[in-house]
Image (cartoon, grey):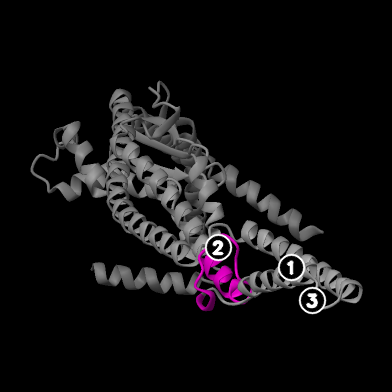
Amino acid sequence: HSSPQVNLLDLLAFLLLWRKFILTGVISVTVAVGIISFLVTPRFRSTAVIRSHESSGPGIGALIASKLGALGGLASFAPTLGQVPEETYVSILKSRWLNEQIVDTLHLRSVYQMEDEPIEDVIKVLKARTDFQLDNRTYHIIMYAEDKDPKLAQRIVECFVDGLDRRNRELKTYSATKEKEFIGARLHEERARLTSLEDSMSRFQIETGILNVEEQVKATLQAVATLEAQRLTTQTEMEINARIMGQNSPELNYLKIKLASIEETLNRLVKSKIESGNADFLLHMEDTPEKGMVYLRLMRDIEIQQLLVAYLVQQHEQAKIDELRNTPTLMRLDPPTLSTIRIWPRRGFMVVIAAVGAFVFSAAFALFLEFLKKASTDPTHPSYSRMQSLIQNWRGKSV
């Protein structure tokens, strides 16, 4: 336990021996840094917080799009037009175009005293005094600017917000214009296709007589069932009449004619329409499955095409509105502030750091001087002989 105590006593003795030197160094550096901190030009920071406007509800377009989800890529056809993600906002804020606009608007060349410098250097200085951060949780964009003039710092942030809003509106308008042109061309094509499908359905109905498969099949089946029941009833009456009245009975002849008429009607309903050559409301059982399938496919295509056209009409009208829209695209959650508290220099922090640094440096330098003193005067010191030879060599070179 004696070694730490001896070392601590040696350290205290060393500090007491060199206290004047160390205190002089600490006080000198601290006072100098304190004076410098008052001479350094102060900087003020203006801050703003923004985010994009909340998008409106999905509306009818999204409802139609959900019904068209089975059509693959069409479901991803953007229901809202011209939206710019928040990541793009930061890219716009850091773009050369916007920074150059602010340099020209606020005459920063003369403010920064860089009239003869290239624009790239002026923009570099501006970027060094500004910063933009995106909060990935809330999607808020925090921006700030620093300058010795708090009003200029506030004006710089205002120009960035206004420039971002203006550029964002330009991008949305351009996007909406291109969307309108694309959707308009697609709408023209899909309307033509819908007309073609409707014409095909009209020709099919004229050729086949199918107007409503479900109702016509139901009516045909009812008619066939009724005729089949009448045929069986007539056959039974014929058998009874033949036994009672004989084969030459007028009543029997009437029943034979009636049965032949019923069977002819049944054959007409069962045979293909092409074979029968008739065009009526009732369907023909042999060709009903094939023609019914064609009818259902045509109806499916027409319904899908009608949904697609309705969706494109809604999107086309929305694109027209967005193209002419001139409303703000940003929410200014925290407008640019006029700072009254400097952010630099932090005088207290500078003085504390200077005092600590001066103490460490002074103590280290004093320790070095103490080492040189003992090594050159104490014969028992391990480095005494080397120090003497160095002194003699130095004196010899001096002579």
Residue underneath mark 3: 248
Quadrant including the N terminus? bottom right
Q: Residue at 60% of width from left, 66% of height from top?
A: 283
Q: Secondary structure at mark 1?
A: helix
> Which mark is drawn over residue 21?
none
Q: Residue 164 at x, y = what percent?
A: 32, 38
Residues 246 and 336: in front is 246
Residue underneath mark 1: 254
* On screen, residue 278 above or below 32: below
Residues 95 and 393: in front is 95
Asked if residue 290 is among those painted magenta in the image, a careful observer would answer yes
* Residue 307 visible: yes
Q: Secondary structure at mark 2?
A: helix
* Residue 81 visible: no
Residue type, label 2? Ala
Residues 94 and 193: in front is 193
Pick whichever of labels 3 and 1 is earlier in the sequence.
Answer: 3
Q: CA distance from mark 2 to mark 3?
A: 69 Å
**In the image, is 317 to the left or to the right of 212?**
left
Please identify the quarter of the rendering in which residue 238 is found: bottom right
Pick whichever of labels 2 and 1 is earlier in the sequence.
Answer: 2
Q: Residue 245 at x, y = what percent?
A: 87, 72
Quadrant including the C terminus? bottom left
Which stretch is magenta? 274-297
Residue underneath mark 2: 70
Q: Residue at 52% of width from left, 60% of height from top?
A: 299
Residue type, label 3? Asn
